Amino acid sequence: MTSIRARLTVSYVAALTATLVVFAAIVWSATQTEATRTLQRRTDLVADLAAIILQTSPASISLLVTEDSLVGQKIEQGVRRSLDMLPGYVIITDSTRVLYSSPAVDRLKLDDRQRLVNAAFRRTREQPAAEVRMDSTANIFVIAHFETPSRRIPVHRVVAGEPVAGLSLRDSALYYPILVILPLILLLSSAVSFLLAGHALMPVGRLISDLEAIQDGRSLHRRLPVESDENEIDRLSQTLNAMMSRLETSFAALRRFTADASHELKTPLTVLRADIERAMQSPHVADDQLPALEEALAETARMADLVESLLTLARADEGRFDLHREDVALEPIVREVVETAMILGEASGVRVRLETADTVHVDGDPVRLRQLFLNLVTNAAKYTPRDGLVTISLEDRGDHVAFVVQDTGVGIAAADLPYIFDRFWRADRVRSRTGERGGAGLGLAIAQWIAHAHGGFISVGSRLGRGSTFTVQLPLRGAPSQALGHAPGHAPGGQANPHGRLSET
């Protein structure tokens, strides 16, 4: 469970559950205590009434009469009728015998009646009350009042009893409310707390959406909305805005440095190249110096290409590189790129084949589109071994066009795929066919920028040792870029590019 909303809901429900359980326990305990006290008071009152009946009996009659020689003395019949009207269980005894037992006592089973009588005789002044366990009925709470015997009223104790009912949780009136209402309260509280947590976290969701829109250095000019500075979310937004301001300044300085340095290097490199070419054409140059001059010329040309690529990317990052858009027919450009690739592949023994070339039109810059296609084809040929095959196709797929370059080269490791479009990123040199110095790692970065600038994207699928497939998808002329259905930097049906980056050339 990773959602803050879910964790807040669970925490709230757990706290509420504990609170309700404690509250229910306290209420039940208080209710049980009060019920016990009520039972004691009621029983005590019955015992008092029995004693009062005995004390207020007419003095002209004898309270005790001998009814049976086997039974012994019993309470006089008129007094018995008065005692029979008392509720509950009543037992009146002298020191050794039961003088009176109420009808409720007589209706008990023999074993239960004997337990109740024994409990009555066991009561003492120090422990007048007790709970007697019954088998055939509810337990009975008894309390004894001790009297001063006289000749007329030889009574030692008056014992009253009441059934213990409603004191257990199951018998309590709170049992069903606790069993039914508490779960409903918890269910309703869970739903309410989930909604409240979602409402409270809505600013966080908006903050995440705003931050997701800032994906790269070109979006650092955007700022998060701040309504006030009185809550944590707004203070977080202010902190992030300050951080993005510093990052924007740093990125801008870096771009300016790259653009200025690249621009300043173009002139000396051009002069150096011209001087080397002039030295190579001089009649006084020694034969053993020509290889060194050729190497210097090649490195100078490579450095000039690197500077040009850096300048292109720097201008693109700053938004100062305008595309000259027009109606472009891609088939002639692709055929020209294939012819160039065949010439490049002849020296290394790599075959280049055009499988499909549909007649399609896009709205774009023909020069940049040719650079995009050529970068991908050159990259494929570079990492395809001798006698390998590079297959190129241009397909009309309804609302977009797909330029596909498939090779039988060394492939790209799965761990390297998310980084192949990073600037200056290069895989291990063992991927290279001959180990020669290749590009600077900017070709595919430029290709990705060109694809994005035309409303498309590049996807790549590859398996180590089995080759790679690069696919450029561009919207057809008149079709919106959203029709592609994928954001730039993601590969549909292949390897996703979570970093929005693609490889090297």
Image (cartoon, grey):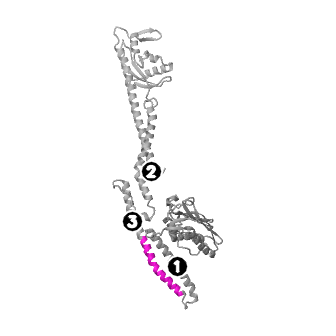
Residue 365 vertical position relative to residue 127 in the rendered view, above or below = below
Q: Please count the marks in the image.
A: 3
Secondary structure type for disc 1: helix
The residue shown at (41%, 54%) is 206
Marks 2 and 1, the one that precedes in the sequence: 2
Magenta stretch encompasses residue 437? no
Single out the residue that lies furthest toward the top: 60
Kindly indicate the quadrant of the structure image that contains residue 287: bottom right
Three-letter code, disc 1: Ala
Kindly indicate the quadrant of the structure image that contains residue 59: top left
> Distance of mark 1 from mark 3, alpha carbons?
37 Å
Residue 68 vertical position relative to residue 187 in the rendered view, above or below = above
Marks 3 and 2, the one that precedes in the sequence: 2
Predominant secondary structure in magenta? helix
Residue designated by label 3: 246
The magenta stretch spans which residues? 254-279
Residue designated by label 1: 301
Three-letter code, disc 2: Ile
Asked if the residues shown at circle 1 and circle 3 are in contact, with their CB atoms under 8 angstroms apart, the answer is: no
Kindly indicate the quadrant of the structure image that contains residue 426: bottom right
Q: Nearer the viewer, residue 432 or 179?
A: 432
Left or right: residue 478 versus residue 435 is left
Q: Position of residue 94 (x, y in %)?
A: 41, 16
Quarter of the rendering occupied by the C terminus: bottom right
Residue 65 vertical position relative to residue 425 in the rendered view, above or below = above
Residue designated by label 2: 4
